[in-house]
Amino acid sequence: MGPSGAGKSTILSALARRSPGGVVVTGDVRLNGRVVDDSIRKITGYMYQEDYFMTVLTVKEHLRYMARLKMDRRTTQLKREHRITTLLQVLSLTSVADSRIGGLASDGEKGILSGGEKKRLSFATACLTLPQLLFVDEPTSGLDSFTAARLVSVMKSIVLSTGASMIATIHQPSPETLAMFSSIILVAEGRMVFSGTTDEALHFFQDCGFKMSKMITEGEFLLECLATERYTDEKQSTSKLKRKIPVRKLAASFEASKYYSGIEDTIHLYEQENQLNSSDFNYKEPFWIVKLFWLIVRGILELFRNPNVQWIRIGQKLLIAWTAGVCYIGTIELDQKGVQDVQGVLFLLVTENVFAPMYAVMAVFPKEYPQFVREYRNGAYSPSAYFLSKMFVIGPGAILEAFLFTTLLYVLAGLRYELEPYLITTAFTFLCINVATSCGALFANAFSSIPVAMMYLLPVEYVSMVTSGIFMKLSSLPWMTSWLQYVSWFMYTYESMCVAQWRGVENITCPIEELRATCLLNGEEVLEHYDFSANHLIRNAVALLIFCALFQIVGFYCFVRKVKREL
Ligand SMILES: Nc1ncnc2c1ncn2[C@@H]1O[C@H](COP(=O)(O)OP(=O)(O)OP(=O)(O)O)[C@@H](O)[C@H]1O
């Protein structure tokens, strides 16, 4: 307990070994005398001050997925369901078990669960694994004093029923709430100022010269003793304190007091009597592949539940295909004008299948990052399982969009009505889209923010587009930039689509016989005109697969590096 900014959350996360990146923690964290490492994350529960949930899930679904990701792999389905049902009942969440969790206030969405219900759901999530030690950061913030006291009371009964311990930070407890804590640690300016029972704390501060007015509660009195701001004019102070003592001095007085030596004796006793043995950590987390599976299932469910993500984008795609397609209806013939029209449609197919999926993926990673951080710090899954699950979840949606877009535009524009060219066009659309999504994942994770990522991505995209053969003859590229065509995934896709349309076309009409020398008279000439070769299909497919793999590997490396740096 301590005033705002005293360092409560910092010390709690340090004890739970969940400190954010950049926070330097010195010393050991000991559990019954034994030094613990980061594996403590898997065997302890942690409830954060702010809630982050996948808001389109229902309360029960959320708990079910978290149970699959976190509960001991030996737990049976029956026991999992029983644990969820019990928690829902004890935390009075049964009536909202099938309601969607709703958005965060900061999302601008209206939340379906109330603030108190979300706090209880957070607590249920932290309790799922029956942890023997629970860290709870400001469980009562934002709640009225009655609801806060009720919540702490329910938390305490759940924790006691499993024989566990709970360490909570608390800002301004009501007398009822404060009375529920068996001992308190008072913190100010990042220092421990007192540790013991509430009664001992009152005695300690009164010994230090503070006088408690009858007008204020015990909690208010303790907070006022720790208040760091100094009043220039005593009359401005609502405090009835006799005098102010700097926190540094208070901490020194505590260290010299009998209460402090009592703590040292207790620690010593615990070290001797309560050495943990390895069976205390008898927790077997679910297998990596099982976590990956449930992350994919959860991601797919979210995708289908969230119309903004999927259905609207599919509708938008079909609309673009239709709008573009109707402009070409009846225009494509095997003549000189038709060549330009076909090349135009192919250009639309390539660009539309690159930019939209790439930007969609770029938006996903930063949006979900806060929730990933929470779940990762709680030991729910690894960065590799999360990253791969995203690729699996985003891939099919993007492919469905591409398939619908390509098919509609292909038919409306009247590209070659034969199975083989259609299949080649669709296959390269799939490959291109996978390269684009992988590239989006790479840039989203390689840079600190999306604007910075865009700053680097746009030039790369433009170079890739300019050297694709759409805008200039590849043979006319100057020698120092001609190699760029081989790193242009636009080029590999565009060339393959051109081959699909023009390979085997034997006659393209020329309007004026005298101009035959300047006309493109068959498909082979069209391909030659663009410096493309009909033999490059396999090469292009392999190149796109290599791009995809490369972007995924580097993207994953950047994601892991970012996680390691920040967490
Ligand atoms: N021991 C410490 N040494 C240096 N800086 C610290 C220490 N403890 C906390 N801080 C810094 O003080 C600031 C406030 O810390 P923290 O958020 O933990 O406070 P809090 O008591 O939880 O605040 P609130 O009640 O407003 O959530 C943070 O910037 C944190 O990095």
Image (cartoon, grey):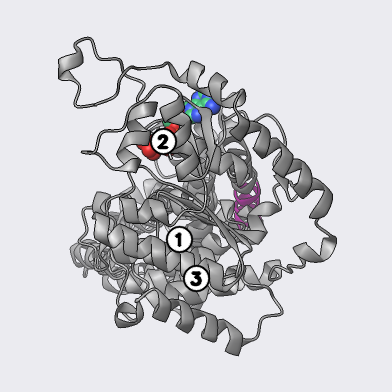
Measure the alpha-carbon separation of dots 2 and 3. 25 Å
Seen at 19% across and 67% down, the residue is 326
Q: Name the image quarter holding the N terminus.
A: top left
Residue 505 sits above or below residue 14 on the image:
below
Disc 2 under 8 Å from ligand 1? The reply is yes
Q: Is residue 196 left or right of residue 1?
A: right
Which quadrant does ligand 1 occupy?
Answer: top left
**Residue 274 visible within the image:** yes
Q: Which residues are magenta?
A: 541-553
Of the numbered discs in the image, which one, if any, rests on residue 2? 2
**Viewer-side residue, 44 vs 285:** 44
Q: Is residue 506 left or right of residue 411?
A: right
Q: Residue furthest top?
A: 232
Kindly identify which residue carries mark 1: 522
Disc 1 under 8 Å from ligand 1? The reply is no
Q: Secondary structure at mark 3?
A: helix
Residue 272 sits above or below residue 21 on the image:
below
Kindly identify which residue carries mark 3: 158
Q: Is residue 178 left or right of residue 238?
A: right
Measure the alpha-carbon separation of dots 1 and 2. 82 Å
Q: Position of residue 328 (x, y in %)?
A: 23, 64
Of tags 1 and 3, the one toward the viewer is 3
